[in-house]
Image (cartoon, rainbow, N blue to C red):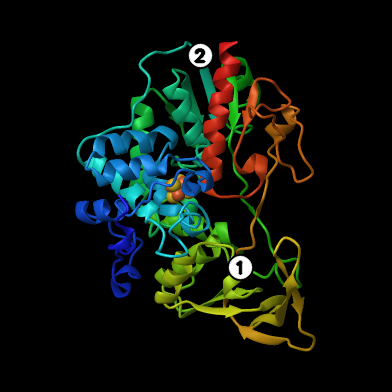
């Protein structure tokens, strides 16, 4: 360890731009053994590891870095899989610069440890050598229904199975994975990674019931009667527009609608009203990771030009820096400090903005510059302005207490106002990261186990 004085941080290498924009295959290559070992060896093993504290799962990062640096892959695999239900997935999609790597003690001075890339290396190399995540052989004779198979649902299923609780996972789509499968593009996360984890869960005893919407194909009452507990992890997928004139025009779309339709096409699933951007001028409004997913998807779909419009400056973008870099490399043009005013026949009317001085939380407000409007020509306009919680009828039927944003209220054990029902992820806290939903699913599983063992 401590090799940071002689070895610089390196990122995982990427496929060439010319190659990668022709397909939806992953952009990053895996670290090889030498690179992973060298990079792990840079860790200074701080007494109070900020990376561990900033990781929403509180992964024991320095412990698995040490094992990689000493060539103990099997132990690194076990430690990494102990706190995370799918490290190779989160290592690929987490905005590390805002989380573990952002708080690495070396970040400011020498470059953070390449935590995400090493996390991916551990699991992928482990799988290639035949290592598998461990599950419990003992069963406690209880069964839980999980509604939704996104990150919260899959995480909850993993930790319930590890504690000897059987699970049935209900998913309304054709495939399991929720946002991981249909929302995050393949160039960030190959869909086989999710299928592999689903297979591990099936081997451990989970049943996946696909194409089954609770309240439509099966009543919530059946679930309440049949299971010892229920976990709700239905996410927050309702997209937001800007509330401006003209946004109901047929060429204006929501980010998740666009991303899901493209992914369904790639799966050869039936797609109604496909959003065809080929040879069109596309603008995406928003500056987060979902906006980056949309612009990069539009490039791969053959758009003539792709612009990302964001109302703050580049420094204040909320998403992962590496995704912005990737988008720029792939030909996306960024227009900062602009705000949409209305949609017109040939595009979108924008107003220029400026930022105020930082408030007490360090956040700068956006102010419109008077008389600064202009038209940005566009054939297709996509809003990527965040998500809201949906409120399916079964939530009412269960009589669950909600907060003012329609989030399901839970106690510290993730138990709702209905004692048999637990919830976590975006359906509780509002739109957030996949890794926070994963954390909620894990902690809810522990809450459910406590409830079942009473
Ligand atoms: Fe970092 Fe995300 Fe992995 Fe945690 S789960 S160590 S935040 S990449």
- Looking at the image, residue 453 sits to the left or right of residue 339; the answer is left
**Is residue 128 placed above or below 442 in the rendered structure?**
below
Name the mark on residue 169. Answer: none
Above or below, comparing residue 441 to residue 452 in the picture: below
Rendering coords of residue 359 (x, y %): 76, 66
Classify mark 2 as within 8 Å of ligand 1 or not, answering yes or no.
Answer: no
Near-viewer residue (306 or 113): 113
Secondary element type, mark 1: loop
Foreground: 241 or 136?
136
Where in the figure is residue 267, as x and y percent of width and height? 38, 52
Residue at 53% over, 38% down: 439
> Residue 142 — which label?
2
Residue 178 locus on image (x, y percent): 50, 44
Q: Quadrant of residue 412?
A: top right
- The residue at 25%/55% (across/down) is 38
Q: What percent of the width, then of the height, locates residue 327?
A: 45, 71
Q: Of the residues under marks 1 and 2, which one precedes in the sequence?
A: 2
Q: Is residue 31 found left or right of 98 in the rendered image?
A: left
- Name the residue located 36 percent from the left edge and 35 percent from the top edge: 79
The answer as to whether callout 1 falls within 8 Å of ligand 1 is no
C-beta proximity under 8 Å, tags 1 and 2: no
For the image, the number of numbered tags is 2
Task: Using residue 82 as the reference point, say whether residue 399 is left or right of it.
Answer: right
Where does label 1 land, which residue? 286
Q: Quadrant of the C terminus?
A: top right
């Amino acid at each position: 360890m401590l090799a940071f004085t002689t070895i610089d941080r390196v990122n995982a290498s990427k496929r060439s731009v010319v190659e990668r924009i022709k397909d939806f295959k992953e952009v990053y290559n895996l670290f090889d053994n030498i690179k992973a070992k060298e990079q792990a060896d840079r860790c200074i093993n701080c007494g109070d590891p900020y990376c561990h504290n900033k990781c929403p799962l509180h992964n024991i990062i320095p412990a698995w870095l040490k094992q990689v640096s000493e060539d103990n892959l099997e132990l690194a695999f076990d430690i990494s899989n102990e706190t995370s239900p799918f490290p190779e997935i989160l290592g690929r999609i987490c905005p590390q610069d805002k989380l573990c790597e952002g708080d690495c003690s070396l970040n400011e001075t020498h470059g953070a440890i390449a935590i995400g890339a090493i996390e991916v290396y551990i699991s992928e190399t482990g799988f290639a050598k035949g290592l598998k995540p461990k599950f419990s052989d003992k069963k406690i004779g209880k069964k839980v229904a999980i509604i939704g198979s996104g990150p919260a649902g899959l995480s909850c299923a993993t930790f319930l199975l590890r504690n000897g609780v059987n699970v049935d996972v209900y998913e309304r789509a054709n495939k399991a994975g929720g946002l991981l499968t249909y929302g995050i593009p393949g160039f960030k996360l190959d869909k086989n990674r999710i299928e592999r984890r689903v297979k591990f869960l099936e081997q451990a005893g989970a049943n996946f019931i696909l194409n089954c919407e609770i309240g439509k194909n099966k009543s919530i009452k059946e679930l309440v009667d049949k299971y010892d507990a229920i976990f709700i992890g239905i996410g927050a997928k309702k997209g937001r527009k800007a509330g401006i004139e003209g946004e109901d025009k047929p060429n204006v779309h929501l980010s998740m609608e666009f991303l899901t339709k493209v992914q369904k096409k790639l799966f050869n699933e039936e797609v109604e009203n496909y959003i065809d951007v080929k040879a069109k001028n596309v603008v995406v409004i928003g500056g987060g990771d979902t906006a980056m997913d949309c612009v990069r998807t539009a490039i791969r779909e053959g758009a003539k030009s792709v612009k990302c419009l964001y109302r703050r400056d580049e420094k204040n973008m909320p998403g992962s820096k590496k995704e912005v870099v990737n988008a720029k490399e792939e030909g996306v043009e960024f227009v900062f400090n602009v705000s949409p005013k209305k949609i017109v026949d040939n595009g979108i009317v924008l107003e220029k903005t400026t930022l105020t001085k930082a408030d007490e939380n360090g956040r700068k407000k956006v102010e419109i510059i008077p008389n600064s409007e202009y038209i940005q020509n566009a054939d297709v306009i996509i809003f990527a302005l965040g998500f809201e919680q949906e409120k399916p009828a079964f939530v009412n039927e269960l009589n669950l207490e909600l907060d003012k944003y329609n989030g399901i209220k839970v106690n510290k054990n993730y138990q709702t106002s209905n004692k048999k029902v637990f919830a976590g992820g975006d359906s509780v806290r509002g739109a957030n990261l996949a890794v926070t939903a994963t954390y909620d699913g894990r902690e809810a599983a522990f809450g459910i186990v406590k409830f079942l063992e009473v």
